[in-house]
Image: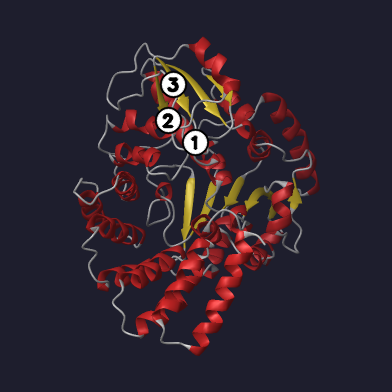
Amino acid sequence: MTPTNDLERQLRNACVRHEHEPHNLAILREICDVLITLEREDELIDWADRALALGTQDHHFFAVRAFALDLLGRHAEAVETRTRAPSMADNPALAQLRLGYSLMMAGHFAHAIQLLDEARQPVATSTPNVLATAEQLLGEAMLKAGDPRGFKHWTRRNDSGDAGSYRPAGIPAWDGESDPRGRRVLVVHQLGFGDNFLLGACVADWRAAGAQVMITCDPQIHALMQASLPDCEVVSAARPLQTHGPLPDAVRARVEAFAPHLYATLLHLPVLRAAQTTCPYRFEAYLRAPPAKRQIAAAWARQLRAQHRGKKLVGLFWDCGQRHLSNVGSSMRCWAARRSLPLDALNRLVTDPALTGRICFVNLHHPLAEAAAGMPPATVERYLPGIHLFDDTAACIGELDAVFAVDSAVANLAAMMGKLTCVPVNTSGDWRWGHSGSTSNWIESATLLRQTREGDWDPVVRDAAAWLAAL
């Protein structure tokens, strides 16, 4: 019997006992604790509500209810739950952090920034992880509000346990202020592909400041990044999974030959330019596929346009694969689900009579991801040379007229190629897409179509059809 099976059996037994003892708070707490251990926190609301209906003032039930509401995008309700919860006298900084997060995601930036700024100030009950997370979230709130000074605070994500990161032995870290002119800088990667595509644009700032740069990246994007950053040495390395892990042995010799004076993480890259301006600035498009892949894509596109004469070619990406995985945790799974466009909504778009005679849609999913994402019944073309790595995706996108992609690596890739990109976003999207309007402070080529009610994609699909018709 695996530990997971044991927990599932414990959960079933606890649910049965609850039927016989519905007023037993200990059983309700056990159910909540098991769901948390199973990383199924999105199922907590009903159980927490049952406990709160009994009049309990146990902070635990308020906390798990608010966390579940945040996972599901119901941030205003999470704020209300956290506000009426009894005070956490033993850890007020953690309570401020959690409320600040809910406020930020609900769009109340001024209040969120105030609370998160207070939560990052050390007090007797603070832990290093709470302080780092509070500062990271402070940075995100500022960036959502369009303030580039947030990048400096956002670097604390490296210490919050939220992402892996390399810490090369014997190489000092950039302090966030010193002039990199004449220095050899090793930039180590982390986070997702979309972050790598977006933040890699800032390498140009470091080159312009007089630095010589070596950058590490995932093998899946190595050829793309090398073609896009010809003035840098780009090294393929596995993505770091632990905080401040050592560099892999496979790249150590190349790093030693480069002999860096200092290193920076991806999160540090925009800090250099942000320190020189108080106004939002754009991430400039820079990505391009390798020449050989571009030639292959051009030949494919000529044939496809011949088959669909007069039609625009539009790439489609609608499903974030993490939502199908049971081993990634509820936060990542729910975030992916909230960003994904349901297949029935996509089908309404690709079968819209106003578009079928004018648009040829092209699927931009990797073939392995397509099995989980599903395909709309309507005709959607595939990139016949095949999408294996991201340089293939980039080659295909380079031949398209536009891309319609949910918040994903593909949306970031298209935007950082300078391709006309339409991004449907949920009610509390990532900071790079801003929080209101149809444009982003950070990415010029992106048009944003925003949900006004969490989970309701119908108005977004109508707006998308109008955007595509205007092509």
Which sits earlier in the primary sequence, circle 3 or circle 1? 3
**311 horizontally vs 109: left or right:** right
Label 1: few (<14), some or many (≥20) within 10 Å? many
Query: Quarter-wise, where is residue 278 in the image?
Result: top left
**468 horizontally vs 396: left or right:** left
Location of the N terminus by quadrant is bottom right
x, y percent for residue 184: 42, 14
- Tell me the element at label 3: loop
Type of amino acid under label 1: Gln
Which sits earlier in the primary sequence, circle 2 or circle 3? 3
Q: Which residue is mark 3?
A: 169
Label 2: few (<14), some or many (≥20) within 10 Å? many
- Name the one closer to the observer, 49 or 428: 49
Q: CA distance from mark 3 to mark 1?
A: 17 Å
Which sits earlier in the primary sequence, circle 1 or circle 2? 1
Query: Quarter-wise, where is residue 302 in the image?
Result: top right
Image marks 2 and 3: residues in contact by CB distance under 8 Å: no
Image marks 1 and 2: residues in contact by CB distance under 8 Å: yes
Q: Which mark is residue 190?
A: 1
x, y percent for residue 435: 37, 55
- Position of residue 314 relative to residue 60, above or below, is above
Can you tell which of label 3 and label 1 is closer to the viewer?
A: 3
Q: CA distance from mark 2 to mark 3?
A: 14 Å
Q: Which residue is mark 2?
A: 265
Type of amino acid under label 2: Thr
Query: Residue at coordinates 57% horizontally, 78% vertically from top-left?
Result: 13
Type of amino acid under label 3: Ala
- Tell me the element at label 1: loop
x, y percent for residue 209: 36, 18
**448 horizontally vs 271: left or right:** right
x, y percent for residue 179: 30, 18
